[in-house]
Amino acid sequence: MYSIENQGITRPALIMQQRKIPAVFMRGGTSKALMFHRRDLPTDARLWPELFVAALGANDPYGRQLDGMGGGISSLSKVCVISPSDRPGADIDYSFFQLTPTTDLVDPSASCGNMSAAVGPFAVDEGLVSPVGTEACVRIFSTNTTRMIHSSFSLDQGEAAVDGKMSLPGVAGFGSPVRLEFKDPGGGATGHLLPTGKPIDEIRLPGAKSIVASMADAGNPCVFIQARDLGLTGAEMPDDIERNPEILESLEAIRCRASVSMGIARDIGEASRIPGIPKVAFLSPAQDMTTLAGNTVSAAECDILVRMISLGQPHRAIPVTGALCIAATARVDGSLVSGMFDTTRCGSELRLAHPSGVTSVDAKLEKRNGNWYATSATIYRTARRLMDGYVYMPAARTPGLGVVPEL
């Protein structure tokens, strides 16, 4: 976790009104982010948080990020840093940073699966890898989780294909599919697929109330609870949840207690300062629901309903890493998640209903010496380059940067 304060950086007098750095603005899945080449950023990575906050217009008391590239919600307040990799078996190193609209916190603790969909196309279109033929497979090393992601997609005249027939819930129109295979996704943050060693645990909340939960780490650490334990149906829309501060407070309390139980934080105070993980979601068995677009999803079209929270805000779709973690946990006997699924479907993709529609995801697990291991997890997304050029940062908001190198 970074805060741009207390970084021990000397701040010279302002020498120019604005600074600029080459950047690409991309959509990956249901998120958007600024994409930077590592070579274009300051050599001193301690300067990056200040740069990212200014570029996205974060730390905005109004929460709208109108003075930057962010969109006022967590899924639109992201940064990816890409560079060629010198690691065996990898083409690209990918580092992800999550920002929040209203604070200066820059969180590198988790990866972003949605933006992973943009990394391969970015690498091809920027000439960092040079595939031959009509298909590409870019091998991505996630520095956040120290795990590999294989990104496979079609090429169109040597560049990442954009046009296609895939409809992604939460994104208007159609695009060319990007297949993401997350290799050995378990334990990237905690070292174990089941950080507590158990498929189901008890979390004690303020007021002595206890609820059951499953805590898992696949893609990103997550804690899963039942909607009914919060007095919810599981079919609520993001605005309904956001209008209920009591529910949001309970979910944050659950997240912080799970963080301590999973070994991510030493205490509740530290857990509150690591807002990106674990992700927290409440689940309910398959039922009819209506999406944000007004479409009906029947109980027969899904296996479970998922409502996930990102940085204290209800997610309008589902984070990819959250979907992967649900799929992996569903394969673990005795977990809260597996108990909600029709076990006769465990050989097929799982269909997760979220506010924007249904996402299909698959995970493969095996048992070794009595312990569960996730060998892979797969999901499909789309991605598209939206803009490229320079991102400008006011000198008044980046006094510690001095002169930023530019191409």
Image: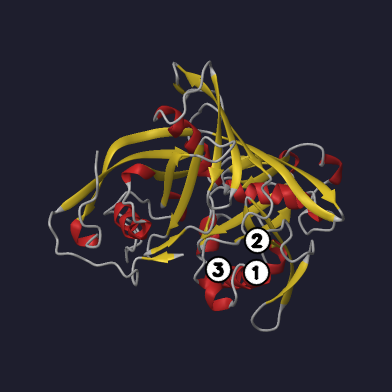
Say left or right for 139 vs 34.
Answer: right
The amino acid sitting under disc 2 is Thr
The amino acid sitting under disc 1 is Gly
Where residue 257 appears, as percent x and y from the top left, is: 64, 73
The amino acid sitting under disc 3 is Leu
Q: Measure the alpha-carbon separation of dots 2 and 1.
A: 7 Å
Number of residues whose C-alpha sits closer than 10 Å to that of mark 1, classed few (under 14), some (14–19) or many (20 or more): some
On the question of residue 100 being in view, the answer is: yes
Assign a secondary structure to mark 2: loop
Residue nearer the viewer, 204 or 192: 192
Q: What's the residue at 32%, 60% (across, down)?
A: 50
Q: State which tag comes first along the sequence, 3 or 2.
A: 2
Q: State which tag comes first along the sequence, 3 or 1.
A: 3
Q: Is residue 261 above or below residue 184?
A: below
Residue under label 2: 190
Quarter assignment of residue 63: bottom left
Quarter assignment of residue 333: bottom right
Residue under label 1: 263
CB atoms at circles 3 and 2 under 8 Å apart?
no
Q: State which tag comes first along the sequence, 2 or 1.
A: 2
Residue under label 3: 248
Number of residues whose C-alpha sits closer than 10 Å to that of mark 2, classed few (under 14), some (14–19) or many (20 or more): some
